[in-house]
Amino acid sequence: MDEKEYLISVGKNITKYRKKKGLTSKELGYLCDIEKSNLIPIEKGRINPTSLTLYKIANALGIEVKELFDFTEERSRPLQ
């Protein structure tokens, strides 16, 4: 996995947990004090968020930060 794929995987996990909670990007941004315009590039894997930003996002989602880095489900999917 290269750096770009890594950031995309983190972003996908954020999106997955956000949707599980039934939150929009705007609502998650509000909960963790991040503008929606800043959250979307994180979810898309376009920027590398700071550890503090990931901490805020995980807290708002009610998960541990390490869950954002669990890519086992993604790796088990067949390549398309």
Image (tube, rainbow, N blue to C red):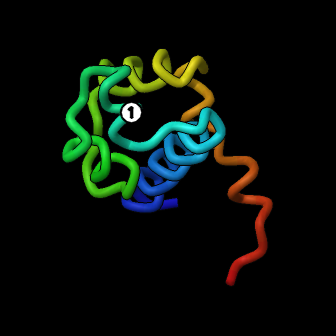
Q: How many marks?
A: 1
Q: Is residue 47 left or right of residue 12?
A: left
Q: Secondary structure beneath disc 1? A: helix
The residue at 29%/36% (across/down) is 49
Task: From the top left corner, tell me how far across and down residue 69 is, in percent.
Answer: 57, 37
Residue 24 location, quadrant: top left
- Give above or below for 16 relative to 53: below
Q: Is residue 15 left or right of residue 26?
A: right
The residue at 38%/60% (across/down) is 4
How crowded is the residue under tag 1: few (<14 C-alpha within 10 Å), some, or many (20+)?
some
- Give above or below for 61 relative to 70: above
The residue at 45%/48% (across/down) is 11
Task: From the top left corner, tell me how far across and down residue 68 is, in percent.
Answer: 55, 34
Q: Is residue 80 left or right of residue 43?
A: right
Task: From the top left corner, tell me how far across and down residue 13 is, in percent.
Answer: 56, 44
Of residues 30 and 80, the one nearer the viewer is 30
Of residues 13 and 23, the one nearer the viewer is 23
Residue with the mark numbered 1: 27
The residue at 42%/26% (across/down) is 57
- Disc 1 marks a residue whose amino acid type is Glu
